[in-house]
Image: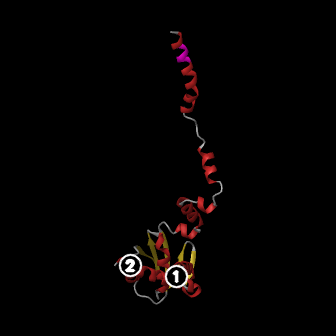
């Protein structure tokens, strides 16, 4: 019987190091992540969430304020029709353009244009620039006169839009590469037939 006891004790001694390996170890995930990131470039490590956060912080104050409800006071010229007619016409025109506004008569020749979705603020300002009845308008404590600024407050937006439209265009290389791409696409279709 002794040999059973000796065999059991020796088996226990041999399996003891293997039991320690099976235990759960605590892993330092931060150190592991930093080890994986070593050698990677900063641009490779950015996620979509990081990029979105950076874009939000880059917005200026006017863009940030424009996300909520906004009010614009429009001062009309001396020669104009009834304020109620102008207000209803403007409201209908902007509604047809996809912008929902409420327009109220404030004073003798002053209208209050209120919009719930401030993202359309630049569109409303552009609309007011185009109206002959408007002498000036005020938004966020700043007065915009049609004679003085000639629509400069929304040129920034149009330049960005033009830049996005022309990106990849305008250079000979990009035109050549598009032509090559079209020719490759058509040859692939012929090969399939």
Nearest the viewer among 115 and 109 is 115
Eyeballing the image, is 36 above or below 84? above
Q: List x then y, in percent, for residue 120.
A: 46, 73
Q: Specify the farthest residue to the bottom.
A: 79
Task: Where is residue 88? Give x, y as percent.
Answer: 37, 80
Q: Which mark is residue 158?
A: none
Report whether 106 appears left or right of 147: left
Circle 2 sits on which residue? 191
Q: Nearer the viewer, residue 14 or 127?
A: 14
Density class for disc 1 (Cα within 10 Å; few <14, some 14-19, many ≥20) is few
Q: Residues in magenta?
A: 5-9
Is residue 8 found inside the magenta-colored segment of the image? yes
Q: Is residue 184 above or below residue 70?
A: below
Q: Main secondary structure of the magenta part?
A: helix
**Crowd rating for badge 2 (residues with CA inside 10 Å; few <14, some 14–19, many 20+):** few
The secondary element bearing badge 1 is classed as: helix
The residue tagged 1 is: 177
Quick check: 112 above or below 36?
A: below
Is 87 placed left or right of 14 in the picture? left
Q: CA distance from mark 1 to mark 2?
A: 21 Å
Residue 68 in percent (x, y) is at 48, 66
User: Split into 4 quadrants, where in the image is the C terminus?
Assistant: bottom left
Count of numbered tags = 2
Say if mark 1 contacts mark 2, CB within 8 Å. no
Q: Secondary structure at mark 2?
A: helix
Does residue 192 appear left or right of residue 13 in this picture? left
């Amino acid at each position: 019987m002794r040999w059973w006891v000796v065999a059991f004790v020796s088996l226990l001694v041999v399996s003891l190091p293997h039991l320690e390996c099976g235990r759960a170890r605590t892993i330092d995930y931060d150190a592991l992540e930093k080890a994986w990131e070593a050698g990677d470039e900063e641009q490779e490590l950015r996620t979509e969430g990081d990029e979105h956060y950076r874009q939000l912080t880059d917005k200026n104050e006017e863009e940030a304020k424009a996300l909520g409800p906004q009010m614009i006071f429009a001062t009309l010229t001396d020669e104009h029709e009834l304020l109620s007619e102008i207000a209803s016409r403007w409201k209908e025109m902007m509604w047809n353009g996809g912008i929902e506004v409420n327009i109220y008569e404030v004073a003798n020749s002053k209208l209050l244009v209120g919009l719930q979705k401030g993202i359309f603020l630049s569109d409303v300002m552009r609309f007011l620039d185009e109206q002959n009845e408007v002498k000036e308008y005020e938004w966020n404590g700043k007065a915009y006169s049609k004679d003085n600024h000639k629509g400069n407050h929304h040129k920034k937006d149009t330049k960005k839009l033009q830049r996005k439209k022309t990106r990849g265009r305008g250079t000979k290389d990009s035109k050549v590469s598009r032509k090559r791409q079209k020719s490759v696409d058509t040859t692939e279709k012929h090969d399939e037939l």
